[in-house]
């Protein structure tokens, strides 16, 4: 199964991808996690990305594509993947299409998690208190939501027009949202 998870900050992409990874037995590729690992390692790429991420802006398309090509060169992605955090603009959607074409792969579905903005803000505030992620402060969150509206929302339309979009209600318990996703993408795998 090859999935792209779309949704604004706090919509539950990472949370649900962690569960889907176990369920579908395919790797979870989070571009946010890959970038945070570079920042934590203090690599040249991490140093470049750190301030951009803290401001809630997008890291350059070239850096992201390089990271993605590198990750997709690993054998474990042949059986499938859950891509979380990419693509975030139309240029990235185009780059992903070309990369998968080169690899002879095609993803099954782009799943959009729909969650109202006030709930996104509430969830991120909860995580800010619990974990203190550098970009979970109110100013960066506002910027991330704006970037999502301006640059990532068109990606949803792009996949809708290609007939590849599946919209899932992201409001509810973790189990409820997970069941909705599984039912939408792989109803034959739903047990019980
Ligand atoms: P990234 O790490 O991708 O962050 P994001 O998109 O802002 O997403 P979040 O991690 O905030 O939310 P999520 O949807 O994964 O929700 P989560 O499951 O964590 O990117 C960070 C930065 O990296 C970007 O701003 C950018 O700078 C850079 N970057 C990354 N990819 C890039 C790209 N492709 N191009 C350029 N730059 C890129 O849940 C959030 C919280 O809600 C958690 O506390 C969770 O426990 C809680 N929660 C989840 N589901 C529920 C539920 N159903 N009920 C109650 N609480 C819930």
Image (tube, grey):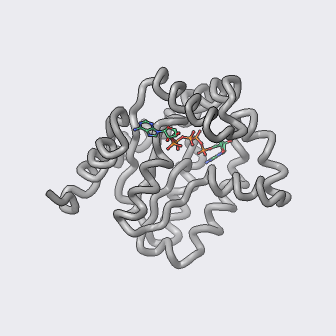
Q: In the displayed structure, does residue 90 sit left or right of residue 20? A: right
Q: In the displayed structure, does residue 70 sit left or right of residue 103? A: right
Indicate the quadrant containing the N terminus: top left, top right, bottom left or bottom right: bottom left
Say whether residue 44 is visible.
yes
Q: Is residue 76 above or below residue 129?
A: below
> Which residue occupies the foreground of this view, 175 or 96?
175
Q: Position of residue 28 (x, y in %)?
A: 50, 61
Which residue of the protein is positioned furthest toward the bottom in this rendering? 75
Which residue of the protein is positioned furthest toward the left in this rendering? 192
Task: State the residue at coordinates (57%, 55%).
Answer: 30
Task: State the residue at coordinates (63%, 32%).
Answer: 129
Count of numbered tags: 0
Which residue of the protein is positioned furthest toward the top in this rendering? 118
Picture quadrant where residue 98 is located: bottom right
Q: In the displayed structure, does residue 50 sit left or right of residue 87? A: right
> Which residue occupies the foreground of this view, 2 or 28?
28
Task: State the residue at coordinates (73%, 41%).
Answer: 53
> Which residue occupies the foreground of this view, 83 or 136?
136
Say whether residue 163 is visible.
no
> Which residue occupies the foreground of this view, 157 or 147?
147
Q: Is residue 184 above or below residue 121?
A: below
Task: State the residue at coordinates (55%, 50%).
Answer: 86
Ligand 1 is found in the corner quadrant, namely top right
Picture quadrant where residue 74 is located: bottom right
Q: Position of residue 155 (x, y in %)?
A: 49, 40
Q: Is residue 51 above or below residue 70?
A: above
Q: Position of residue 168 (x, y in %)?
A: 32, 39
Q: Position of residue 14 (x, y in %)?
A: 50, 49
Q: In the displayed structure, does residue 60 sit left or right of residue 32? A: right
């Amino acid at each position: 199964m090859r999935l792209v998870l779309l949704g604004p900050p706090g919509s539950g992409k990472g949370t649900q991808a962690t569960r889907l990874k176990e369920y579908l037995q395919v790797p979870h590729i989070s571009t946010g996690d890959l970038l945070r690992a570079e920042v934590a390692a203090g690599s040249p790429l991490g140093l470049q990305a750190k301030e951009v991420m803290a401001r809630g802006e997008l890291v350059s398309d070239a850096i992201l594509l390089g990271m993605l090509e590198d990750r997709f060169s690993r054998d474990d992605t042949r059986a499938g993947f859950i891509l979380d955090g990419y693509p975030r603009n139309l240029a990235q959607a185009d780059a992903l299409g070309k990369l998968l074409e080169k690899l002879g792969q095609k993803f099954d579905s782009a799943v959009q998690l729909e969650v109202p903005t006030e709930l996104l803000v509430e969830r991120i505030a909860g995580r800010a208190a619990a974990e203190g992620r550098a970009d979970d402060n109110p100013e960066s969150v506002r910027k991330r939501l704006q970037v999502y509206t301006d640059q990532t929302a068109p990606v949803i339309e792009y996949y809708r027009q290609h007939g590849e979009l599946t919209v899932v209600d992201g409001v509810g318990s973790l189990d409820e949202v997970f069941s909705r996703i599984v039912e939408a993408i792989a109803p034959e795998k739903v047990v019980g």
